[in-house]
Image (spheres, rainbow, N blue to C red):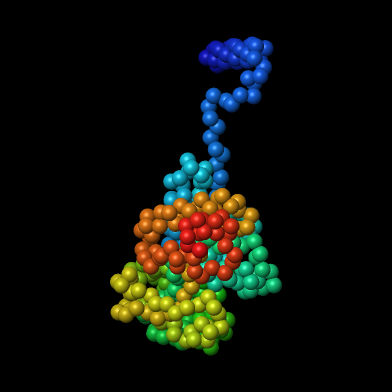
Amino acid sequence: MKKFLILSIVLFSGFAMLAACGQGEQAQAPQQQAAAPAQPEKPKTTFVTIGTGGITGVYYPTGGAIAKIVNAKKDVYGIRATVESTGGSVFNVNAVMAGDLQFGVVQSDRQYQAIKGLAEWEGNPQDDLRACFSIHPESITLVAAVDSGIQSFNDLKGKRVNIGNPGSGQRQNSIDAIEAAGMNIDSDMIAEGIKAAEAPGLLQDGRIDAFFYTVGHPSGAIKEATAGARKVRFIPITQVDTLLQQYPYYAKASIPVAQYPGAENKEDVQTFGVKATFVTSAKVPEEVVYAIVKEVFDNFDTFTKLHPAYAGLTKQNMLEGLSAPLHPGAEKYYKEAGLM
Ligand code: GLU
């Protein structure tokens, strides 16, 4: 109590003196009042959040890689990027449009549907959605337990299969693949809507027979699924010709099995795929988007070393697979860099 009293007195007299000095100065030199403060003001920090996916996917480390590169230049741009684990592409589009997130990693097919008002956005095009760049390829990956007897796609009939949570990008890919094979998620199987991060554990515990995951390779989730005691194999998805004709965003793809030595497959597995893309909103300021795009591209070699799924990236192919208009901040950088 005594200490507190003394401190208060000292502080109070300090303030009183300061106030007196201030008044004195004011009286002597009123024109100096508006002069710059002695300490230069720090530029204010702009906080941006990047929506990703489950932590064992590739979106989460991708958000981390972008944030790391941008945050290294915090003193230049005043941008502080953080990463959020989310339910996936559809959630990210909606959160970016709502202004809850400033950036999101989103499948190229979901970007296409959102801007055109299709699928989850039927009749409700997301006009403010803007593209920044595309990233790694993702393939529709079907993992099945060997003891479930699933050897080919049509063996999914009657099985318990995770197709992905609502809010994920992958869920519609699973449905498209199942329907392309002439099956239905409600009448031909027990379809689960669980988050991709939980599927490997459920498969290993014998609670599901198979799961779909639209993901870049290698991914933590697929490593987890292929490294357990219950043996698993990738199931090829080959009945895709109609899908590829019908939808411009689907392309043939293959899963590199060398990245998953625990899987039973000996050869790369045929399937179809999309691309991961980086999106934002028209409402996010030009200088913020410009800074992020510039840092990722100017540090291309550093960036592509941050995850093995980026192995095939070139600056040029990072401008492909985008269907929303480019954000003006991204366009400004690409023109400056001679990329467009
Ligand atoms: N493509 C997945 C989705 O949007 C996410 C994949 C990942 O997190 O790497 O559902």
Q: Position of residue 328 (x, y in %)?
A: 59, 57
Q: Position of residue 313 (x, y in %)?
A: 40, 65
- Observer-nearest of 326 and 304: 326
- Observer-nearest of 292 and 169: 292
> Toward which corner of the image does residue 61 lie, by quadrant?
bottom left
From this viewpoint, is residue 54 visible?
no
- Observer-nearest of 148 and 11: 11
Q: Position of residue 146 (x, y in %)?
A: 36, 80
- Is 330 placed above or below 171 here? above
Q: Residue at x 54, y 68 (%)?
A: 322
Q: Position of residue 274 (x, y in %)?
A: 48, 73
Q: Residue furthest right?
A: 123
Q: Residue at x 45, y 59 (%)?
A: 62
Q: In the shown orientation, is residue 107 left or right of residue 29?
A: left
- Is 296 placed above or below 191 here? above
Q: In the shown orientation, is residue 79 left or right of residue 25?
A: left
Q: Quadrant of the N terminus?
A: top right
Count the marks: how many? Answer: 0
From this viewpoint, is residue 31 visible?
yes
Q: Residue at x 53, y 27 (%)?
A: 39
